[in-house]
Image (spheres, rainbow, N blue to C red):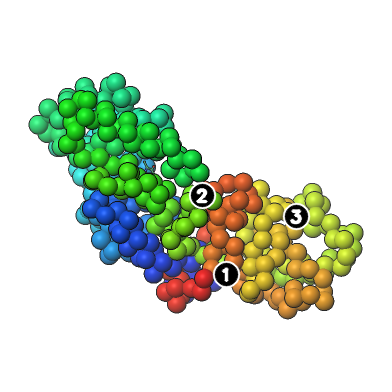
Amino acid sequence: MSVDRRVYPRAELDLDALRHNARLARRLAGGASVMAAVKADAYGHGIEHVVPALRGEGVSAFGVANVAEGVELRDLGVTETILVFADPVEDQLPECASHRLDVTVGQASTASAVVRSDLDLSVHVKIDTGMHRLGFAPSEAAEALRCLTDAPHVDVVAAWTHLATADEEDASFALQQIGELDSVLRQSGFANMPTHVANSGALQRLPEAVQGRRFVRPGGLLYGLPASRTVAGGFEGRPVMRLVSRVLCVRTVEAGETVSYGRTWRASEATLVATVAGGYGDGLPRQLSGRGEVAIGEVRYPIAGRVCMDMLMLDLGPPSGPGAGVRAGDEVVLFGGSAPAAIDLADAAETISYALTCGLTGRVVRVPAPSNGFVH
Ligand SMILES: *Cc1c(COP(=O)(O)O)cnc(C)c1O
């Protein structure tokens, strides 16, 4: 651990914030159980840190993208429900059964493989209500539900759908989707089938997505990452990740001189420039070239010139300004804590906060914050 702390950039995790967010999710969920979306290594935060903390707060189910991620969670000692969000292929079914992974069934070929298999499987029947990514068309749902519930070795846990606009200003399509799921189940004689529909945006904003449901499936809320500016309004989640690095060196660049590849940044006057460890090799989007700001102490400085693989440069301003106090070795916060939030840096890179944390590469060490919390 002491070695890890000298590696930069590193992602410090505020596990108190994570626990706060888990309690918030449980409160918003009412009578529904929280199924935490921990796919993509817990949105880049590291399942080995995130999952034990969530389990400690009574999170009773986990959602992952594929069978391999589900097996990894079992190997971490997770005993709770694990749902794989996408249909497995037929030859993965024995592994699902042996690791007790709940299986998504969203197409006829998966349904027949599950029924044929004779394996004891728990399934969640996915219905496509408008996302058009995975799931049975509403017209196919009744037959799928019938053949799965008729199979004695299959436990149909729930029917579910995924919402396309829960994070958008206008969430009316999401409400339409929820109505569609409920009406498909009513019309096919499965009105009492448990359901789940809510991602973080819906959990925060759409009571229809929560009340009377079996599960809610937040991801971003747990990590303190709003999916959009709309969700950021009234967002009560606390950011879990702070991305920290160090100044490698500081130099003065004279008027007319340029910084980094392609010479896209040019000093209009004598300017202090800090070189910081961290670049696209760490997962910082190269789209941040010449865009976005990061913090040294309480002061924010713009990124100057192109982001490199291992380094980026900051415009510290004139030698007479506050940047004059910056020294090699000083801590730089790229996002989180006193720095801009992940969503701010994501905006500058024309992406979303989820993509920023998911994109951090294996070179970025994930460590619980030293003080078990950091200043926001
Ligand atoms: C990722 C995912 C979620 C969580 O979405 P958030 O916006 O992070 O809350 C929920 N359901 C499914 C099917 C997902 O793939």
For label 1, being within 8 Å of ligand 1 is answered: no
Residue linked to disc 2: 230
Amino acid carrying label 1: it is Ser
Q: CA distance from mark 3 to mark 1?
A: 23 Å
Relative to 98, 345 lies left or right: right
Q: Nearer the viewer, residue 233 or 76?
A: 233
Residue linked to disc 1: 338
Q: Residues within 10 Å of mark 1 (few under 14, many from 20)?
A: some
Residue at left offset 56%, top offset 67%: 244
Q: Residues within 10 Å of mark 2 (few under 14, many from 20)?
A: some
For label 3, being within 8 Å of ligand 1 is answered: no
- Residue 228 in picture, x, y percent from top left: 52, 49
- Residue 171 in picture, x, y percent from top left: 45, 40
Residue linked to disc 3: 305
Q: Nearer the viewer, residue 292 or 205?
A: 205
**Secondary structure of the residue carrying numbered label 2:** helix
Relative height, residue 13 to residue 208 (above, below) = below
Residue at left offset 71%, top offset 75%: 326
Q: Is residue 89 visible?
A: no
**Secondary structure of the residue carrying numbered label 3:** loop
Q: Nearer the viewer, residue 295 or 114?
A: 295
Decide which of tag 2 and tag 1 comes sooner along the chain. Answer: 2
